[in-house]
Amino acid sequence: MLSLGRYGRELREAASGAFLSASDLRGTGHAFATAVYWQTVGEDDSAKLVLAAASFGTLINGQEPKLRCAGALGIAALCPRLHDEGRKVDRVACSDYLRQAGAALVSMVFSDEIPEQWAASWALVELANLRIWAPPVEPDLVGRLFTLWLHSPNSEVRRMAAWALARQPICKRDDGRRCTLVERSDLDHLLNRYAELSRRREQPAFLAAAWYTRGLSDAEIAERSQTLLAVVDDRTAEITLRELLRNLGETP
């Protein structure tokens, strides 16, 4: 209501300004995303989802950080609506635009700007839920998300990067080019405190990194994945763990 009301423009400007200042990424990011989404699709969002996907993709490729963040946050708001079973036709129609957006989101994750890293990571979380796009080999998106998770100076970026890493489709590792940015000492550090890591985000993220880097034996990755699959209460984390087990030749 606020986004489409009399003061919608002021709301969007205030939210974007606060978000770009990186003072409260989560709160201002959700406000910015809400304004961008509803001001793009209008009151009847079901009729304009494809146009919105195209519009957000254009914004992600914009010259200004505010435009790129608006596009990424728009994608983050759009993808959950496409996940509903009743939106299959819309999901198919939007897929090409969303795949193109994925490449631009990768560039944002590699940005030095904290708001861009957070917005793109959130968009990658939601895009991964649709399972229509896989992380590229080059640049090393998986390794970059791992690095942000462990070493970003911003706690909200660390949290979102771990979530994005945990949700990415599991890909083949034969060429050894994924996770080249991951340091063995970081893996060892996480392994030593594995029990303290969150089940929904950090443990799946660690197991994905261990898969690509062969940081654990396949048998140990499979055992930990099966154990986590039995207790985790998150649909997309379950999908990721099942993909990991299938790549290991195990039955989830």
Image (cartoon, rainbow, N blue to C red):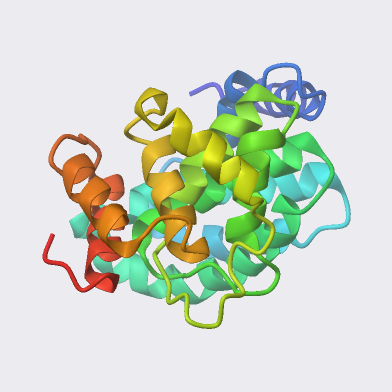
Q: In which quadrant will I find the C terminus?
A: bottom left
Which residue is found at the position 55% from the left and 45% from the top?
187
Residue 30 lies, in percent from the top left, at: 55, 28
Up the image or down, 61 lies above or below 45; here it is below
Q: Is residue 103 visible?
A: yes
Residue 153 lies, in percent from the top left, at: 75, 27
- Does residue 200 appear to the left or right of 98 in the view shown? left
Q: Is residue 37 visible?
A: no
Which residue is found at the position 55% from the left and 35% from the top?
189
Up the image or down, 93 lies above or below 57; here it is below
Residue 76 lies, in percent from the top left, at: 51, 46
The answer to which of 251 and 5 lies nearer the viewer is 251
Up the image or down, 155 lies above or below 135; here it is above
The answer to which of 75 and 207 lies nearer the viewer is 207
The answer to which of 42 and 72 lies nearer the viewer is 72
Residue 231 lies, in percent from the top left, at: 16, 34
Image mark count: 0
Extreme residue in the right direction: 63
Which residue is found at the position 77% from the left and 27% from the top?
13
The image quadrant that residue 147 belongs to is top right
The image quadrant that residue 28 belongs to is top right
